[in-house]
Amino acid sequence: GSVTAGTTKRAGSATGSAGDHIRIVGYVRVSTDIQANEGVSLEAQSEKLKAYCKLHDVELIGIYKDEGLSAKSLERPGLQSALKALERGKANTLLVVKLDRLTRSLLDLDALIRGYFSKEQYHLLSVSESLDTRTAMGRFVLYILGLIAQWEREAIGERTREAMAHLKRQGVPLGAAP
């Protein structure tokens, strides 16, 4: 995972209350080259995070990146570096463009919530879902979105298995090219 330098802004207005200094570390991820070509590239995600921070006048410490890695596991170098930035006190908030960039696993989401975002010390924000774990409603919505992401991942797996079984029944050769 790599990191890009951030901007320096002070917390204020829409995202934080008076006296509440929000220091954000961003996290972006793509799992395939196809995603990069369909507008969810690392650069496009990074620009959305920067725009969010500028709009809400909050400090962006840096953006950590994982390219070509699935959200099936939390063992991703960029994500681990972003979480370590929280632990070291460099930032108190993790910002993602969309929750599925962070994880599609309900168990992993639960581990992140229990380990980081259920406490008052760290927060999770998502640009697309307008998610903010600083409130009880934000944490509730986070779990609902996590359930949807888990369902989506499982449904994709089911459709893929069904399509492969259909092709096999049709006699289509499957596997690596000869």
Image: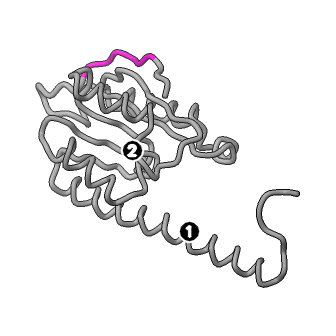
Vertical placement of residue 3 versus 140, above or below: above
Looking at the image, the residue that sits furthest to the bottom is 169
Label 1 crowd bin: few (<14), some (14–19), many (20+), radius 10 Å: few
For the C terminus, the image quarter is bottom right
Query: Type of residue at label 2?
Result: Leu
Tell me how the rendering is colored: one colour
* Distance between mark 2 and mark 1 Cα atoms: 19 Å
- Residue 144, position in %: x, y? 31, 64
Of the numbered discs in the image, which one, if any, rests on residue 157?
A: 1
Q: Residue furthest front?
A: 178
Residue under the image location 54 percent in, 42 percent down: 69
Q: Taking 23 as reference, is 138 above or below it?
A: below
Q: Residue at x 42, y 61 (%)?
A: 149
From the top left corner, tell me how far across and down residue 89 is, in percent: 21, 22
The answer to which of marks 2 and 1 sits earlier in the sequence is: 2
**Which residue, given by chain and number where applicable, does mark 2 sit on?**
74
The part of the chain drawn in magenta is: 5-10
Q: Hey, which quadrant is residue 30 in on the image?
A: top right
